[in-house]
Image (spheres, rainbow, N blue to C red):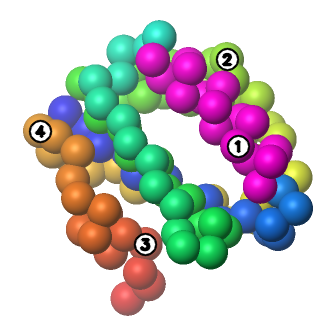
Amino acid sequence: MIVSITKIELNSFSKLIDFFKFNRQIINQLKESNCKKYKATGSWNLKVWYTMTLWENENQINDFYRNGNHLEAMKQSKKFSSKIQSHRIENDDLINWKESKKLFIKK
């Protein structure tokens, strides 16, 4: 199984509504996909957001990312964020947020 973790930092608070709109559409797409589990969380200042998804293989992840609302969100992402990072790790289940956020700390 593969866990995909994404960190999105919004350019400004004025982009929050656009982000929520895309996020809602992507969650709806996730519900109809081969994704096994997903979760999302934000920072206390509402500017940094994390998503985590669980997939059986890379093909399922790539099919999801390259289609539908997620594809459109990636095209539009520069309008609301200039800092998007992601990591993929092998694991049998989603990991905790504390552990996942450590993946984004520069060493």
Numbered circle sitting on residue 61 = none
**Where is residue 39 drawn, in percent x and y?**
38, 42
User: CA–CA distance between discs 1 and 3?
Assistant: 22 Å
Q: For mark 3, what is the residue?
A: 104
Q: Which residue is mark 1?
A: 20
Q: Disc 2 marks which amino acid?
A: Gly
Label tally: 4
Q: From the image, tell me which residue sits under label 2.
A: 68
- Up the image or down, 6 lies above or below 26; here it is below
Q: Residues within 10 Å of mark 3 (few under 14, many from 20)?
A: some
**Number of residues whose C-alpha sits closer than 10 Å to that of mark 4, classed few (under 14), some (14–19) or many (20 or more):** few
**Is there any visible trace of residue 85 in the rendered image?**
no
Q: CA distance from mark 1 to mark 4?
A: 29 Å
User: Could you classify mark 2 by the number of other residues whose Cα lies within 10 Å: few (under 14), some (14-19), or many (20 or more)?
Assistant: few
Q: Where does the image place residue 15, in percent across and percent down from the top left? A: 83, 57
Residue, x 48% and y 23% (percent of image)?
30
Residue 43 placement (x, y as % from top left): 53, 69
For marks 2 and 3 on the same chain, the one whose residue lies earlier in the sequence: 2
Question: For this view, does 87 lie left or right of residue 98?
Answer: right
Disc 4 marks which amino acid? Asp
Label located before the other in sequence (1 or 2): 1
